[in-house]
């Protein structure tokens, strides 16, 4: 019988189960949400299991990772840069598994 040997030379990469971007459809924020999703996928696409865009209303612009709110337009009073979202997701991926 053959034994398989797996080499491990770095930190274990954690997969994010779910990234959801909820954007305000009546406010015409769909293109911004698509740009954010594109930036996230370009940087972290292979490490994500799901990236979902959800239309909302009432000025919503929220980003949720694994059920935890990591960005809210209501809280921060500005739209996120895609690079900021990538860094927030990356820091979640680097956290404890």
Image: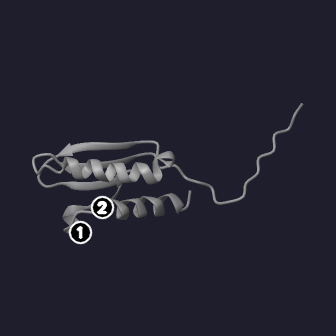
Which residue does the numbered mark 1 point to in the structure image? 76
Seen in the picture, residue 40 relative to 94 is either above or below; the reply is: above
Residue under the point 46% across and 42% down: 49
The reply, left or right, for residue 33 in relation to residue 84 is: left
Q: Residue at x 30, y 61 (%)?
A: 71
Residue that extends furthest to the top in the rendered view of this protein: 1
Q: Is residue 3 visible?
A: yes
> Badge 2, how many Cα within 10 Å: few under 14, some, many 20+?
some
Q: Residue 70: name its quadrant.
A: bottom left
**In this view, 2 is above or below 89:** above
Label pair 1/2, CB-CB below 8 angstroms: yes
Q: Is residue 62 above or below residue 76?
A: above
Outermost residue toward the right in this view: 1
Give the percent coordinates (x, y) of residue 75.
Answer: 22, 67
- Mark pair 1, 2: CA separation: 8 Å
Q: Position of residue 41 (x, y in %)?
A: 41, 48
- Picture quadrant where residue 17 is located: top left
Name the residue carrying label 2: 71
Q: Is residue 66 visible?
A: no
Q: Earlier in the sequence, mark 1 or mark 2?
A: 2
Q: Residues within 10 Å of mark 1 (few under 14, many from 20)?
A: few
> Is the C terminus in the top left, top right, bottom left or bottom right quadrant?
bottom right
**Secondary structure under badge 2?**
strand
User: Colour mode?
Assistant: one colour
* Camera-side residue of 26 and 41: 41
Quarter containing the N terminus: top right
- Residue 74 x, y percent position in the rendering: 19, 63
Report the residue at 40% width, 59% height from top. Answer: 86
Q: Secondary structure at mark 1?
A: helix
- In percent of the image, x 35 and y 49: which residue is there? 38
């Amino acid at each position: 019988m053959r034994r398989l040997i797996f080499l491990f030379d770095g930190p274990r990469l954690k997969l994010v189960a779910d990234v959801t971007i909820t954007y305000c459809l009546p406010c015409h924020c769909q293109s911004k949400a698509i740009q954010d999703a594109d930036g996230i996928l370009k940087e972290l696409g292979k490490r994500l299991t799901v990236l979902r865009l959800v239309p909302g209303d009432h000025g919503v612009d929220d980003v949720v990772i694994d059920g935890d709110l990591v960005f809210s337009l209501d809280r921060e009073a500005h739209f996120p840069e895609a690079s900021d979202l990538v860094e927030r997701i990356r820091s979640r991926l680097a956290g404890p598994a």
